[in-house]
Image (tube, grey):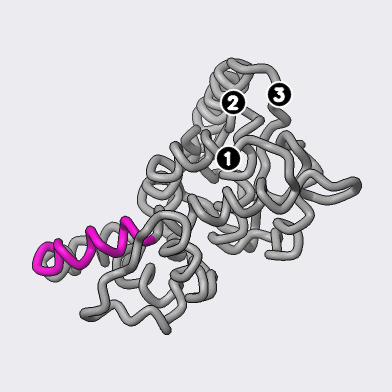
Amino acid sequence: VGGGCDRGDRARDAPTFAVSSAMDRVLQYNFGYLPPRAGLASDLPLSHLAAEILGPRSKKMKTAAGADARNGAGQKAALERRCVNYVRVLSAEMVQAANSGHPGAPMGCAPMAHVLWSGVMSYDPADPEWINRDRFVLSNGHACALLYSMLHLTGYGVSIDDLKQFRQLDSITPGHPENGVTPGVEVSTGPLGQGISNGVGLAMAQAHLGATFNR
């Protein structure tokens, strides 16, 4: 759900994917996937690699960097796949550790989430309540491992230890997203299809806010 107010000059920082390179071994074991070595040394944290493909989030800087990005299209594609697979493995590992949950939906939706969080949505992990943020509404709440993974990877207040407590009593990573419990969770979702109504309501509210205060 897009923000309705004038974004002004407030640029969003590129999200960082703070995942250990040890995840490479998990990828290889689970998927037979081994990241290419040329220019992509796996001893680098994924945050360093992600910075190369995500780049600056301001439109002016993106335009200036456009030519360089096109020149490295093949490397970018490999990095994109690696980022998506990290999200998949992280989500699946959460479910496996809890011995409860749904790994299929997070793994299948990982490419969509990666595109939205890395290149489309505008948000600020340091200020989750920023009024003009884009809202991510997860209608299928049982796929919340995906949402928690993205919140962790993009710098919200969801630690790796919180992910290890997935679906445990009193954790901030419950079995369905709960607004007010986990930073970055916009709505509490459970019944399938509920998020459509949530999204429409949030969009209407932002449109009204923009019509009232934008100048």
Percent x, y for residue 50?
Answer: 38, 68
Q: Relative to residue 190, is residue 125 depicted above or below?
A: below
Residue, x 40% and y 77% (percent of image)? 48
Determine the CA span between mark 2 and mark 1.
Answer: 16 Å
- Asked whether disc 1 touches disc 3, contact meaning CB atoms under 8 Å apart, the reply is no
Residue 74 at x, y = what percent? Answer: 15, 63
Query: Magenta span covers which residues?
Result: 70-82
- What main secondary structure does the magenta stretch of the protein show? helix
Q: Identify the residue under disc 2.
A: 139
**Viewer-proximal residue among 141 and 181:** 141
Q: Please tell me which residue is depicted at 62% across the width and 17% down the height of the picture.
A: 192
Give the secondary structure at mark 1. loop
Q: Who's the residue at 14% across and 62% down the image? A: 73
Disc marking residue 103: 1
Are the two marked residues, 2 and 1, in contact with CB atoms closer than 8 angstroms?
Answer: no
Query: The residue tagged with tag 3: helix, strand or loop?
Result: loop
Q: Is residue 190 above or below residue 5?
A: above
- Name the quadrant containing residue 6: top left
Q: CA distance from mark 3 to mark 2?
A: 7 Å
Label 3 Cα neighbours within 10 Å, binned few <14 / some 14-19 / many ≥20: some
User: Mark 1 is on which residue type?
Assistant: Pro
Q: Is residue 193 visible?
A: yes
Identify the mark at residue 190; answer none if there is no mark.
Answer: 3
Q: Residues within 10 Å of mark 1 (few under 14, many from 20)?
A: many
Residue 29: x and y in percent read: 46, 62
What's the residue type where badge 3 is placed?
A: Gly
Q: Magenta segment: does it hold 72?
A: yes
Q: Position of residue 67 (x, y in %)?
A: 10, 66
Q: 25 or 83: nearer the eye?
A: 25
